[in-house]
Amino acid sequence: ILIMLFEADSTGLKSMAIMLFPLQFFVFCHGLLQLAQLLVSGYLKGSISTIEKRYGFSSQKSGLVACFNEVGNTALIVFVSYFGSRVHRPRWIGLGALVASLAVFLMALPHFLSGPYQYSHSISNNMDKDSALYHATDKSHLKMSPQNCTQQESSTNQEVLPIMLMGQLLLGIGGVPIQPFGISYIDDYASKRNSPLYLGIMFAVTVIGPAGGFMLGSLLLRFYVDFDKLAPHEIELDTGDPRWVGAWWLGFLLAGGLLFLTSLPYLFFPRKMPKESFRITSVQINADVLTYCLSAKETGDGATEPQSEKMIQNRKDPVPSTSYAEDLSMVKFLKAFPKIVLRTLKNPIYLLVVLAQVNLSAMVAGLATFMSKFIEQQFSKTASVSNMIIGGVNIPVAMLGIMAGGGIMRRLCMSVKTSALMCTAMVFTAVLFGIPLLFLGCSTQNIAGVYPSSYKPEPACHLNCSCDDQAFNPVCGSDGVEFRSPCHAGCCMRNFKEVTCAGLSPILQNYTNCKCIGANGSGFAVPGSCGTGCAHLFLPFVVLCALTGFVASLVQTPSFMMILRTVKPEDKSFALGIQFMMFRVLAFMPGPVLYGSAIDTTCILWAKKCNKNTSCRYYNLDHFRQRFLGLQVFFLFGAFVCFLLTLRKIKGSEPLDSEENKPNRLPLISKPSKSEENEKMCKSEA
């Protein structure tokens, strides 16, 4: 209905849209839409370790799921570049967001298709609360036949990965027009002075999306995954249990609904709107809008708007000229596409800045996907606490860095040269902050039969217990050694604490008479992991990690503005399309998979199902920390090199701050007259 209204030849509706939806409101709506879009991304990354545990994914598979939305996005980015200036950009943004909302609902579907979550009880279900531990002499009840194993695997977990990948694929397809169309639309109709501020605000607001996703994960992962299928008294685990799995699916339902609602306003925005100008009063704004509306009535077609263009030209801040690609058919455009790409990439400043952003984006993609898991493993925190730290500390600090970068650039009227200098200095500082993070951590705790390899209990202490090799119900012995299960600790008894509340089961206190604990085999064990003992390093890690993120975030807005100001106006939309395509191909797609693969190489005990590795039980935490955070330093250093080369390239060209080349003049493309005007406007506003 909304599309039919806008397709109707009603100049009154179009004129009213111009009056009701100024550019500032578009910036506001676009911030909300990207907030909702990135809420999904943040929530998925915050719950990735929970999904791993629930469905037995390796970190590499989790990284593939996390980045698979970029496949659909990359496949269509060329067509976005072609249609960038031809189509009704706000309407396409809205339709894409509707598709994305349906994809998010699809990602929650595996929960409703799979059965209840099954976890190891370590054969302790067979004993009464006051009896000795059951020592199985026949392990046939612990194993599945190959036929049953195949049936179970095909009916549950094998369906999950394709569904998650399909949901991510559709999410990427729906998100194709959102950021490129939104940024180019804002930059087309914003004044030169306000454009950095708008983009800085938009980027900062969209950072709240991932933060909200992590905070939502922190809240919802405290609920048991099957709380909708089980009665409260049937839930035996608590959030501190290593086997706990939270309600990962619930957040997708909430985020999908929000994404649907934020997509609706875009169906009302006009295709074009008046260009912002400097030092205009409210009376002048109303006059401009009135002139625009009258011109639309006279022409009967709001697509050309000759009077509006004349009004904008009178403001001496013309709308960028239309791309030459608009005059080409689709076939000719596809043939010309490689030439246009080469022409754009031949701009050395553009290429170097994009490569620097690729390094930073690959770092962010990997850290955002697995930082929660790193905190869980390295500092023995729950998934809820890890998400709270990321969403409540790291991301807000990065948001402040993005806003500060945009504010500094606007305040100082920075040229490309000074922007490159700032980016180089800030990234180098981030490298210096990132190196100490490699040493803030602890080694893996002593785990009997697992780590270190030299520590193995006497086989006789639990030989008669017939423990299941895949049992995972960790207990911490009184001697500080962790065991995979009470059975592996050789425990014979367990003690419960009675609960006075009616309807609640007794709480397990400890296991006693454990043959593998203590000198005489008379030790005890308590449920849960022993932990890494790194609690004293957690706060320094959070502070230093936040500082690194803040400093690195300062380059976000200046680097984007360098790209927008170093390409020809008619190539702006296409250059943004190439930029985002390179982000996806070189950063967002390989980044999480690379990080996940590096994490998998540090696993020292895999869970197995049907003789195949599933998720990892224990990691070598020294290797985990060095490889995970080492990749961060590697990508930061790569960005530093690219920005440094950009600065040298700019210094090797014409001086940008001389009288002949004013501050807003960009190398090779800007005209002196426009630069002089921009300098006067900038100084007058300052």
Image: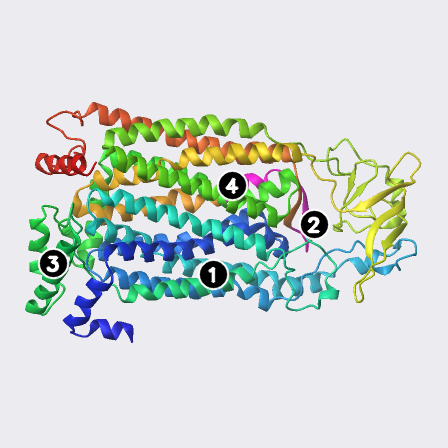
Which range is magenta?
Answer: 593-613
Front residue (pair 114, 339): 114
> If the image is split into quadrants, where does the C terminus sit?
top left
Instruction: Judge the density around disc 3: few (<14), some (14-19), many (≥20) Cα neighbours within 10 Å.
Output: few
Residue 421 at x, y = what percent? 30, 27
Q: Which numbered marker is on residue 240? A: 2
Gap between marks 4 and 1, in whole Å?
Answer: 26 Å
Q: Are marks 3 and 4 in contact (CB under 8 Å)?
A: no
Front residue (pair 1, 447): 1
Residue 307 at x, y = what percent? 7, 59
Quarter of the view holding residue 295? bottom left
Is residue 247 magenta-colored?
no
Q: Could you tell me the amino acid type at mark 4? A: Tyr
Q: Could you tell me the amino acid type at mark 3? A: Ala
Gap between marks 1 and 3, in whole Å?
Answer: 41 Å
- Identify the residue under disc 1: 255
Gap between marks 3 and 2, in whole Å?
Answer: 64 Å
Residue 561 at x, y = what percent? 27, 40
- Identify the residue under disc 3: 287
Q: Are marks 1 and 2 in contact (CB under 8 Å)?
A: no
